[in-house]
Image (cartoon, rainbow, N blue to C red):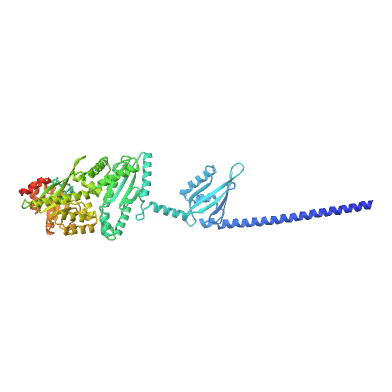
Amino acid sequence: MKNNKTGLKIKQSDEELSDVYEELLAAEEELREQYKELQKSEELLRKSEERYKLAIDGANDVIWEWDIEHNKLFVSDKWTSITGYEINNNTSIKFILDNLIDPDDKNAVIHDLREYFTEKTPYYSSEFRIRTKAGKYRWIFNRGKVRRNNEGRPIIMSGSMSDITERKKSQEMVRHLAYYDSLTNLPNRAFFMDKLNNAIKESKNMNKRCAVIFIDLDDFKRINDTLGHSYGDELLKIIGVLLRICAKDPESVARTGGDEFSVILNNVSDANEVSCYCEKIVNLFKIPLEIWEKHIYSSASIAAAVFPDDGDDADSILKNVDVAMHKVKESGKNKYIFYNNSMRDELLRRAEIDRALRDALAGNEFNIYYQPQVDVKTGRIRGFEALLRWKSKTLGFVSPSEFIGVAEETGLIIPIGEQVLRRVCWQNKVWRGKGYSYDILAINVSPVQMRSQNFSNTVKEIINKTQTKRDTIEFEITESVLMEYTDYNLKLINELKDAGIKFALDDFGTEYSSLNYLKLLPISTLKIDKSFVDQLKNSIVERAINSNIINLAHSLNLSVVAEGVEEGEQVEILKDMNCDEIQGFYYSKPLPAAEAEKLLSAQKTFSI
Ligand code: C2E
Ligand code: CA
Ligand code: CA
């Protein structure tokens, strides 16, 4: 039994053993599996660590971690290549704040951090300049996130820092292109508008005044045309520099058009300050500018308006400076004018005239008056100047000095001038038909008419239709005709001269009075302006000038007509000077055709 028992026992323990053995085997197998797994994840970890390191090393950015509790800063190697500084004990937040970050940006950086720590912003990010070890500035974009402990206190912050210098440079370039004029490097119109809106906002808030000044070159086109564009460009550049020198704030000077500059004067105390500045600019132009060894004279028209006196927003201020500019240009250029409310009234009147003029042609509201020109030596009528008269149904009588300018601006002078030409040529035909003898009928021709495409053909067509005797029509033109489109106009004048038209230079003495033009133009008559004639009595100088002009005109085979002669004394002086003809109230006012005809039919010879 015992053996049996023992034998059984043995048998049992054998079985147990083999079970245990099996279990052991299984456990070993499991361990081996686990080991393999472990090895695998170790391998993965190693790989991901390697990748992570590679990423940090290879990144363009500096990867950083700031242990806030112990105030330690870790930065990746890239730090050295951006800043030039080695990574060592000095690499700390304090060192960076005190030595690297541009002092101008420091407060903003601290502010950005504080906003994030107090959870006012969801992410930390900041843009600032750092000064590298080599002393150069670089733009940095820094961003990061914080880890907090259980109590919510920040313990670790990590993030990355990118060098955005190139991006900033190209942004700056784009900004420069969009906001600066490439020729003069001054702010352009868009930038000027921004600045003006800001200036007005600030003036409003602080209860102050600011002024806007336009500076428009008077003769830029002439400089471009006569000397070439490179001189024109250089002139603009120099003027830009000079305007900056004169300005309280050089950044307030902008180039807002081809030959137009604008300046904002901030914090203006009174009108006097603005006039002083304008005066300075006028004086700038008094001395010639030297460009490539040439002395160039130019002048500018200057207009100013003040906020809030002349308008309470940018639009109305700009509109009113424009109104004032209009006024300067109209009243002889080369000076400055402040906007005032009467200018607006004038502008409204011009608009009214413009409206009424549109009905005038169709409504037959025009009439032509004739003012005789009298030969000084014989008293005979040499001819008449045709002068337009307009009695508007809505505005009553309007003087040509008022409406011709408006008609020129709108182009209406072209059909109006054509009608004058037609009517005067018909009148000529009628008077010639009746056998009256006179030399010419003079017609005023505006530069705007001459610029119109069909002008020459229209003139020829009218002359043919009315069988106007050759050499009986004299066109009165002013020097301004030669200021623009010089070559074109000279060709046109010569062409019309060949078709039988005579030319007189009108208003001599009011514009450039350049004797060169006299030689250049194929004219036969010179008309001395009333303003000269007016001074004959009192000024010896004026007398000498007039006398010289007459002599010179005679040497060029021109006959001279003095205009606006009102007194016998003037007639005597002009006669002494050998002036050829006289036109003025002294002999006769402009007359309706019927009355002018009476003079002709009576063969009136004025007593001299
Ligand atoms: P303008 O060509 O210089 O004409 C002479 C102006 O002087 C005329 O003024 C005439 O009436 C005025 N006048 C003549 N003698 C005297 C005088 O002794 N004393 C004074 N104080 N004035 C005198 P008006 O008719 O008012 O014409 C003004 C301007 O309008 C003209 O100046 C001319 O530039 C323009 N104009 C007149 N008719 C026409 C026209 O048919 N076409 C064009 N384009 N312009 C015209
Ligand atoms: Ca005239
Ligand atoms: Ca005249």
Q: Which residue is drawn at the image coordinates 49% and 52% (left, top)?
A: 140
Residue 482: name its quadrant: bottom left
- Of residues 388 and 200, which is closer to you in this image? 388
Image coordinates of residue 470 in percent, x first then y, are 13, 57
- Along the line of sight, which residue is nearer the eye, 372 or 330? 372
**Which residue in the rendered view is the most extreme toward the bottom?**
293
Q: For this rendering, which residue is in front, 334 or 541?
A: 334
* Total numbered badges shown on the rendered structure: 0
Observer able to see residue 10: yes
Above or below: residue 345 compared with residue 296: above
- Residue 459: give x, y in percent of width and height: 18, 54
Q: Which residue is situated farthest in the right direction here?
A: 1
Write down the quadrant of residue 148 in the picture: top right
Left or right: 333, with 255 as reference point: left
Residue under the point 62% across and 56% down: 48
Q: Is residue 114 left or right of residue 20?
A: left
x, y percentage for residue 25? 78, 55
| Residue 137 appears in the picture as rendered | no
Residue 278 placement (x, y as % from top left): 28, 47
